[in-house]
Amino acid sequence: MVTQAGTGLARIAVVAPNRRLDLALPEHLPLVGLLPAVLRQADEDPSDGTSHGGWMLRRSDGSAVDLTRTLAAQSVRDGETLHLVPRRTDWPELAYDDLMEAVADGARRRGVAWSPFATRLTGLIVAGVLLLLGLVVIVTSAEPGWLGGAVALGTAGLLLVCGIVLSRAMADSLAGAVVAAAGLPYAFVGGVLVIGSGESVWALGAPHVLLGSAVLLLSGLLGLLGVGDATRVFVAAVFVGFWGMVGGLLALGAMDAAQGTAIVVSAVTLLLPAMPLLSVRLGKMPMPAMPRTAEDLLRDEPQPKRAVVYQATARADEVFTGMVFGAFVVTIGCLVVLTATGTLSALLLAGVVSLGYLLRARLVSTVRHRVPMLAVGLVGLGLLPLIGAADASTAARVLAVLPVALVAAALSAAAGLAYSRRAPSPRLARLGDMLDILLQLAVVPVACSVLGLYAFMRAING
């Protein structure tokens, strides 16, 4: 762990061939961009390194510092001494006189040692799993009824209150977030069951989903306001609760489950391109003002403090992450309903949405944002043969699905191996952009087919 200097800088000493430097370098920037400035401070010409393979930084034990990574990622501590040396310099390893000490040192390099933080995190994870076991008991009951719903709602309220108290009164936001997050599924299940008359959870209808989503949305808002950590979890709960309420309201009218689901999944899919902008607005990220006059170009406005910008960026990222995970949950549920319907238009809409998520995933660069989008696309395409073609014979499903699965697996493996070594060509990237746009445009017409609007128009026109 890098010791924070208060400004995002690591204060290190650099021993160069001609002089010693005491520098404060940014912790979260790759060293390759900082090396030219270090060479100038050390009175070394960067071009002089071509004769000996370039320059590099080494620790005092001789281990090389990776210039493509940051100081923070390599645990370069505040006050540490680094050596600026030619790359081809012979730096022998440290000699050792204790074989077991060398074995222990090699074992420590194989993984991260268990720490007090790992103990704390494990305890919180185990607590969260144990809390959810009670929910499993309620959901798997044959006839939980209103009593099961009341118990679930009471548990949800208790967990939310405990989470807020842990976060605010005990100053432990992580523990509070885990406890409060465990209450979110209790809130949804409790809202679903509390107006039931003894049916199973899986046999309840639109009114129950509507109430459960409303309780989930309210619980997410309480957690968002009361707990100071894991904002993404509560944003996802609010997102899921809102769209669950929309779907429940639609299904309460003349629409069936497939039609209401088609509207919800289409709206969420079309909302994906706007999510980054929404997260910037909701996170209150400061943005540069666009100049409108010549005086605006000459005006030197004071910039916000760097710490304020970092905090706003973190808020916006949490909101965007919560939206992505919320879209993941909502879309997966909608795809299950669409594929279970079994109609051609519903299956086509599920395929279009799934392919759209796969192509949309390439536009986000972080793992926590890309993985949920890829998961939605892969799960949706997997549901098409598993649920959508469930009525077909076994032989037909095997003959139709297995060759396609083998070809898709081969293409996926080949693409992963190829594009891990080189980036896709600009022409292929442009083709992906065009397909993404076409799939986005195809969502509404296919959803209209699921809603039966085309048949309605034909009936009107005779």
Image: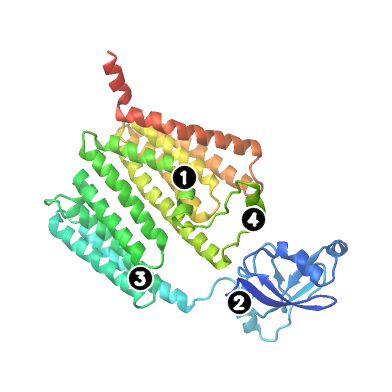
Looking at the image, which residue is at 73% across and 82% down?
95
Q: Nearer the viewer, mark 3 or mark 1?
A: 1
Mark nearer the N terminus (2 vs 4): 2
* Vertical side of 427 occupied by 111: above or below: below
Amino acid beneath label 1: Ala
Relative horizontal placement of residue 283, taking residue 36 as reference (left or right): left
| Secondary structure state at the residue bearing disc 2 | loop
Residue 2 position, x and y percent, is: 59, 75
Mark nearer the N terminus (1 vs 4): 1
- Locate residue 334: give its quadrant: top left
Residue at the spot of label 1: 274
Q: Which corner quadrant holds the C terminus?
A: top left
Q: Nearer the viewer, mark 1 or mark 4?
A: 4
Q: Give me the C-alpha separation between circle 1 and circle 2.
A: 37 Å
Residue at the spot of label 4: 299
Observer able to see residue 130: yes
Mark nearer the N terminus (2 vs 3): 2
Q: Nearer the viewer, residue 389 or 303?
A: 303
| Secondary structure state at the residue bearing disc 1 | helix
Residue at the spot of label 2: 5
* Vertical side of 154 occupied by 239: above or below: above
Q: Residues within 10 Å of mark 2 (few under 14, many from 20)?
A: few
Q: Residues within 10 Å of mark 1 (few under 14, many from 20)?
A: few
Q: Residues within 10 Å of mark 4 (few under 14, many from 20)?
A: few
Q: Residues within 10 Å of mark 3 (few under 14, many from 20)?
A: many
Mark nearer the N terminus (1 vs 2): 2
Q: Give me the C-alpha separation between circle 3 and circle 1.
A: 31 Å
Residue at the spot of label 3: 176
